[in-house]
Image: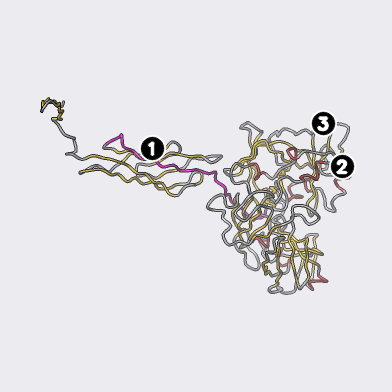
Amino acid sequence: MCRLRLLLVVGSVLWLAACGSSNNGSAVTGVATTCYPSPIQSSQLIQCSALVTGTGAFVSTVTWTASAGSITTNGTFTAPVVTGPTSVTITATSTQNTAEMGTATVVINPVNSLPLTVDAGPQPQTFTAVNEAFTTVTVCVPNTSTCQTIDHVLVDTMSSGLRLLSSVLTIPLPQQNDSSGNPLDECYVFLDGYVWGPVSLADISITGENAASAPVQVMIPDSVSPPVPNPCSSRSLGPNQGNSVSALRANGVLGLGFFQQDCGVTCTTANDVYYDCPASGCNPTSVTLAQQVPNPVTMFSLDKNGVLMFLPSVPPGGVATISGTLIFGIGTQTNNALQSATVYTVPDSGANMGDITTTFNGVSYPSSFIDSGSSGIFFLDNATTGIATCTVQNSLWYCPASPTGTLSSTNQGTNGNQGVVTFNIENANTLFSTGYSAFSTLGAPRPGSFDFGLAFFFGRDVFTAIENMPTPGGPGPYVAY
């Protein structure tokens, strides 16, 4: 122990320590901590560093702690899995003087990306899907751990809302009722058919993003009650795609389009989309915006203003399968910046809502659009294009005797931005005979407009911004690539 000697000097009292520090007069005077980068995503690893300052021959080592996640003795931090933006405090404490420490704050965001796969479709394989981009979605009975993960859900950028086949769904999602207290059902029409079935509630989880108690549509076949109303089936020339997996060619549809709901203000008055379905039968009804099937992205905590799809380039002749990435948010994290993409704004109402204008051979087609849920590039008719057609798998496709070579069109948004699109069309019969699933040169007639389907997406970053949501490129709705 230290002995203290008391000296009296000119009426003053002076205390002198009889023993010095254990480090020969050295001292730690500060610790500065840095962690880079921030923000980061769930489960991401980053390196933290500590700068220890002091006097004399001080010891520069530190011990590391983190308020969440984990950190190694050398400062490598592993972020926790989070469902919303979360701040974590990292602390470096001097081993010589534990009173000296430095802290850094790291912001953790949910993981906002997940794989996309273009392949032959769900198992057991009874068909070969062509140019369909699939992902995986988890749904749960709201506020429970009763969950189901469903693969091969088609990603569709021209519709809004999650729709799952009843034949695939194995958990009891609760039925949503309308304002009359009766079950609420929906008739939703796609380009090549329609789907019918009840609106249920589910907690939706897609990678690190979550939408709680979201309305979803459970698609049912014709043989299941309630029966399809005539006003529903008559709205489409195509069949009920909810009849089976082979009819839909997927286990479900994840609509990540321009609009916050699948029908919007149109359905706040009665029409043939939503139906009040008591035991006596179903009749068209009005619904509030909150009762409608929403684009689930709008219910996320952070990355809620749109999506980015990336698929690698596909050479002529196609490939068997290909993998890409679906990223939520636009300009919300480091992996979804617009960078050099051109923004093409689209109308949010009217006859051409969601459409761009495409000019081909000097003629403008204002009802054109970009749609990951369509397989090929569907454009004009063979009388206009001069490209031969043939019937393959009961559908009409372009089948030139030899590849067309480079075709060129110009896309334009309502903001006046323009960009040239070049593409090539090969014989669909030849492509389908390969048994492959991914083709960048697949095309078919669509009189009076262009539908740039998944064939357009290969080799591009394609952004879809949601209506009224702020983004670095301005508020949605717009498409950018």
Quarter of the picture containing the C terminus is: bottom right
Does the segment drawn in magenta span residue 207?
Answer: no
Quarter of the picture containing the N terminus is: top left
**Which one is in front, 272 or 11?**
11
As drawn, the label of residue 180 is 3
Magenta-tinted stretch: 97-120
Task: Assign a secondary structure to mark 1.
Answer: strand
**Which one is in front, 183 or 305?**
305
The mark closer to the camera, 3 or 2, is 3
Specify the amino acid type for callout 1: Thr
280 lies left or right of 296? right
Up the image or down, 9 lies above or below 380; here it is above
Specify the amino acid type for callout 3: Ser
Q: Which residue is mark 1?
A: 65
Percent across and percent down for residue 211 are 64, 40
Do the residues bearing badges 2 and 1 touch, measured as CB atoms within 8 Å?
no
Up the image or down, 437 lies above or below 41; here it is below
- At a point 63% along the width and 31% down the height, the residue shown is 143
Specify the amino acid type for callout 2: Pro
